[in-house]
Amino acid sequence: MSETVKKKILAICGSPTKGMTYKALKDIEKSYPDIDYKIISIKDANIEQCIGCYQCVQKGEERCPLKDDRDMIIDEMNKADGVIFASPVYVNHVSGLMKNFMDRIGYNTHRPSYFDKFAMVIGVCRGFGADKVAEYLGGILTTFGFNVVSSLELQYSSRSDKEIQFNHEKIIGGMDTLLEKIEKGNKNKPELLQVIMFNLFKYISEAHPDEYSADYEYYKDKSGYYYDTKMKFFHNFIAGRVVKQFDGDMLKNRM
Ligand SMILES: Cc1cc2nc3c(=O)[nH]c(=O)nc-3n(C[C@H](O)[C@H](O)[C@H](O)COP(=O)(O)O)c2cc1C
C-alpha cells in the first residue's frame, strides 16, 4: 500500500518572544498533526545583521560575507511545499528580526526562484497594523516568486478565550486554504508588478552586465515574462524608460 506523502510546511517566526506570534504557529502544530511541520524562530537562529554590501544582489547570494544560518533556513525553505512567514507588528511594520531576515534574502526580488512554492503570511498585533505587516510580507514574497495564498491579520488585545478562539478559526481557515492550494497545485496568476519587475531587472542586467553579473546570468537565457503577449510592447516601453532614468541618475551621481 502506498503511503501518502505528508505536506512539508516551514514556519518562520519573526518574534523575539515566545508570545502570540509563536503561539499562533504552535496552534498550527497542534491542529494539523498530519503535516510535516517545522517552526524556525529567527531569534534562535544565528542570523547576523545585513551590512549593506549589496554583493548578494549584484554578484550573487553566495558572495554574502556573513557566514551564519541564512543558508540553513534557505535550505529548509527550498525543501518545503509551503512557507509561513509570521511577524508581530512593531510600530506599524514587521519586527526588526523579520525585516533583517527579509534584507538577507532580498536578492530574490531580483532573481525570483520560488514559483513552485506556496506561502501564508501572518501579522500579529495588539491593536493596529497587522494589515500593514501582512501586505508587506505578501508583496515581498510575491516578488520572490511565491504563490501567496493566505494572509492572516491576527489581533490579540484582551487575550480572552473568545478572542483566542476567534483567531484560532482564522488560522484554520488560512491553513486549510494553504494546504488545499498545495494539494491542487493551484498557482496564482502573475501580478502586474511581478511581471514589470521581472522584465525591468532583465533589462537592467542586459544594460549593465558587469555591475549586475548575477542578474545577467539569471536572465540571459530567460525570455521576457509576459502574462499577455499584447502587454509585451507596454512592458518594454516602461522598462526602457526606467532604464534610461536609471542610467541618467547613475551618470549624475558619478559626476
Ligand atoms: C516595540 C513594539 C512596538 C509595537 N507596535 C505595535 C503597533 O504598532 N501596533 C500594535 O497593534 N501593536 C504593537 N505592539 C504590540 C505587539 O504587536 C503585540 O504585543 C504582539 O502580540 C507581539 O507579538 P509577540 O506576542 O509574538 O511578542 C508593539 C510591541 C512592541 C514591543
Image: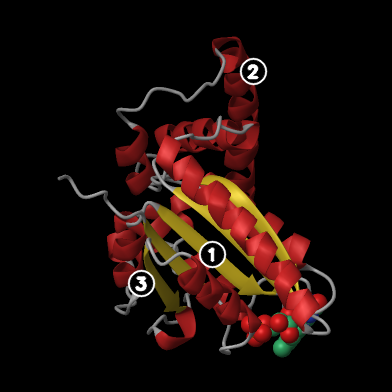
Mark 2: which amino acid? Phe
- Please say if 199 is above or below 164: above
- Please say if 186 is above or below 238: below
Residue 253 visible in rendering: no
Q: How many marks?
A: 3
Mark 1 or 2, closer to the camera: 1
Residue 194 visible in rendering: yes
The tag earlier along the polypeptide, 2 or 3, is 3
Q: Position of residue 29 (x, y in %)?
A: 46, 72
Which numbered dot is residue 234?
Answer: 2
Could you tell me which residue is drawn at 75 percent across and 68 percent down?
Answer: 166
Which numbered dot is residue 43?
Answer: none
Tag 2 and tag 3, C-beta contact below 8 Å = no
- Residue that protrudes farthest toward the left in the picture: 1
Q: Secondary structure at mark 2?
A: helix
Q: Position of residue 230 (x, y in %)?
A: 60, 9
Tag 1 and tag 2, C-beta contact below 8 Å = no
Q: Which residue is mark 3?
A: 70
Separation (CA) of disc 2 from disc 3: 38 Å
Which numbered dot is residue 85?
Answer: 1
Mark 3: which amino acid? Arg
Q: Secondary structure at mark 1?
A: strand
